[in-house]
């Protein structure tokens, strides 16, 4: 070994702990996680102002496994990505699905939920018998998905469908049903749920798990039901995950470890069964 290489080795050994400390410094002492607080049962705000729901409980478990100190903060849906990139908080857990469009502006953890999307309608209305009820179609199978869409389009023609603004569901409507239905966008899902129940719109299009939860609420049980085919993949994304700023590799690694742990020990499955009565564990 030459003198130069020996000195290089000694220098690397000396700087190793410093480099590790700097990498660890990249993870905030307290990780602030933004959530909408209005997307039950993923997340919602209780009467006392505190946050609760599937993502709140799951997030705390993920942080515990990752040995991170975390706190949740409420943020309107349309402000979660701008707020993240403005460093108002460090992560997003708000039913956010991984899509190619979002990956241009944020990074994501591993997915912690997988769910299909579809319609909820007035059970006493004209769409209650929307065909292909409960059948699932992947948008990656273009021929199969298009056949399903062609089957339901005649019944949807001229109907008003509610979606939450700036979501994969708004994008789905624009791509597949533009010109067939009138799309009405809402700031929160709670608003379109109420309008459907009141008969002001004909249907809503959203993730199935929250739709099932809405249909089971006493105030909606007599009016709201799921109908028609369910879709996943493609423009509807690749699962729900934690949104992160670009370049936050250390935080992403820790959160991914936490997600792996709650999947492995069954915590994720147990919590999704508690909140959705369905196992939303991501597949594959």
Image (cartoon, helix red, strand yellow):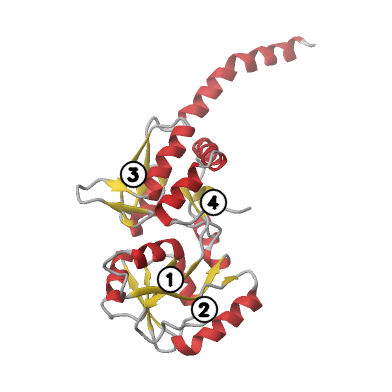
Label 1 SS: helix
Q: Are marks 3 and 2 in contact (CB under 8 Å)?
A: no
**Which x, y percent locates residue 227?**
45, 76
Q: CA distance from mark 1 to mark 3?
A: 26 Å
Say which mark, if any, is on residue 149: none
Q: In this orientation, which residue lies closer to the viewer: 125 or 12?
A: 125
Q: Which residue is mark 1?
A: 170
Which callout, 1 or 2, points at the residue further toward the start of the chain? 1
Horizontal side, residue 151 vs residue 163: left or right:
right
Of the numbered discs 4 and 2, the one sitting upstream in the chain is 2
- Cα distance in 3D space between marks 4 and 2: 28 Å
Res 275 visible? yes
Label 4 sits on a secondary structure element that is loop
Whether tag 4 and tag 3 are in contact, CB under 8 A, the answer is no
What residue does disc 4 label? 281
Q: Residue at x 42, y 42 (%)?
A: 59
Which residue position is annotated with label 3? 88
Pick whichever, 71 or 42, lies toward us.
42
Q: Which residue is mark 2?
A: 176
* Structural crowding at the residue carrying mark 4, measured as other residues with C-alpha within 10 Å and reported as few (<14), some (14–19) or many (≥20): many
Q: Quadrant of the rendered structure where residue 144 is?
A: bottom right
Q: Is residue 86 visible?
A: no
- Residue at left offset 42%, top offset 68%: 206
In the rendered image, the vertical position of residue 67 relative to residue 154, given as above or below: above
Q: Position of residue 164 (x, y in %)?
A: 37, 67
């Amino acid at each position: 070994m030459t003198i130069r290489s020996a000195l290089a080795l000694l220098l690397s050994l000396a700087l190793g702990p410093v480099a590790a400390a700097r990498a660890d410094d990249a993870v905030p002492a307290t990780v602030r996680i933004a959530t909408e607080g209005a997307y039950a049962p993923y997340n919602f705000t209780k009467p006392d102002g505190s946050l609760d729901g599937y993502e709140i409980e799951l997030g705390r478990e993920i942080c515990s496994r990752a040995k991170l100190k975390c706190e949740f903060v409420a943020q309107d849906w349309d402000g979660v990505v701008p707020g993240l990139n403005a460093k108002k908080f460090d992560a997003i857990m708000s039913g956010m699905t991984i899509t190619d469009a979002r990956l241009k502006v944020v990074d994501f953890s591993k997915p912690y939920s997988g769910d299909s999307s579809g319609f909820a309608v007035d059970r006493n209305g004209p769409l209650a018998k929307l065909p292909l009820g409960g059948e699932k179609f992947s948008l990656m199978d273009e021929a199969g998905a298009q056949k399903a869409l062609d089957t339901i389009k005649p019944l949807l023609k001229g109907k008003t469908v509610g979606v939450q603004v700036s979501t994969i569901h708004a994008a789905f409507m624009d791509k597949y049903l533009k010109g067939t239905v009138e799309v009405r966008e809402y700031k929160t899902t709670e608003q379109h749920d109420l309008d459907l129940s009141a008969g002001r719109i004909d249907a809503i299009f959203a993730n199935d798990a929250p739709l099932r939860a809405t249909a089971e609420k006493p105030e909606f049980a007599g009016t709201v039901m799921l109908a028609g085919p369910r879709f996943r993949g493609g423009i509807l994304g690749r699962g729900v995950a934690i949104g992160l700023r670009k370049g936050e590799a250390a935080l992403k690694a820790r959160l991914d470890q936490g997600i792996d742990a709650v999947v492995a020990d069954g915590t994720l499955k147990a919590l999704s069964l508690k909140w959705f009565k369905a196992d939303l564990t991501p597949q594959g």
